[in-house]
């Protein structure tokens, strides 16, 4: 089973930027569709962005499209989330997630992801 460790969260003012990183253990990273989810207090965990195995295709939630960019470096077993023009409503715990190696397509529900990181807090002040 793959293990995921996120980093890069923190406190930032509205309009600022942060880059999240997620490092995966093992040798199957390049065989996995990856995603970033987030969960704000009292809300459901929601998908933010997903990326295919090669990085050639990406998906973004409407609320972050044009502001966030997901990317991956398979040589470093790492997936990134560049977050620009941050808003207070982006405040949440952000989670990295990996699909089982059997699947090659995007998925938007948390139940479709087999492995999760511990989460990293992002707080955007107004």
Image: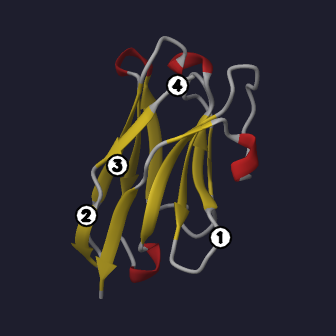
Q: Earlier in the sequence, mark 1 or mark 2?
A: 2
Q: Where is residue 91 in the image (x, y as percent from the top left)?
A: 41, 74
Q: Residue 2 carries which label?
A: 4
Q: Are the residues at dot 2 and dot 3 in contact (C-beta closer than 8 Å)? A: no
* Secondary structure state at the residue bearing disc 3: strand
* Secondary structure state at the residue bearing disc 4: loop
Residue indicated by mark 1: 44
Q: Distance between the residues labelled 4 and 2?
A: 25 Å
Residue indicated by mark 3: 20
Q: Nearer the viewer, mark 1 or mark 3?
A: 1
In the image, residue 75 sits, relative to residue 44, either above or below, namely above
Q: Which mark is residue 80?
A: none
Q: Distance between the residues labelled 3 and 4?
A: 19 Å
Left or right: where 20 falls relative to 105 = left
Closest to the observer, 62 or 42? 42
Q: Which residue: 41% across, 22% down? A: 77
Closest to the observer, 18 or 56? 18
Q: Which of marks 4 and 2 is in front?
A: 4
Q: How far apart are marks 1 and 2 (CA)?
A: 21 Å
Q: Earlier in the sequence, mark 3 or mark 4?
A: 4
Q: Distance between the residues labelled 2 and 3?
A: 10 Å
Residue indicated by mark 2: 10
Q: Which residue: 46% across, 80% down? A: 89
Q: Where is residue 30 in the image (x, y as percent from the top left)?
A: 54, 18
Left or right: where 25 falls relative to 36 = left
Q: Distance between the residues labelled 4 and 1?
A: 24 Å
Q: Which residue: 72% across, 39% down? A: 106
Q: Nearer the viewer, mark 3 or mark 4?
A: 4
Q: Which of marks 4 and 1 is nearer the N terminus?
A: 4
Q: Distance between the residues labelled 1 and 3?
A: 20 Å
């Amino acid at each position: 089973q793959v293990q995921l460790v996120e980093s890069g969260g923190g406190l930032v003012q509205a309009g600022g930027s942060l880059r999240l990183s997620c490092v995966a253990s093992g040798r199957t990273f390049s065989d996995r569709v990856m995603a970033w989810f987030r969960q704000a207090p009292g809300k459901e965990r929601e998908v933010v962005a997903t990326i295919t195995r090669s990085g050639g295709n990406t998906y973004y939630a409407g609320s972050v499209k044009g502001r966030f960019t997901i990317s991956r470096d398979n040589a470093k077993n790492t997936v990134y989330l560049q977050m620009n023009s941050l808003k207070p409503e982006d405040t949440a715990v952000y989670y990295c997630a990996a699909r089982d190696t059997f699947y090659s397509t995007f998925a938007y529900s948390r139940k479709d992801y087999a492995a999760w990181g511990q989460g990293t807090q992002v707080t955007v002040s107004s």
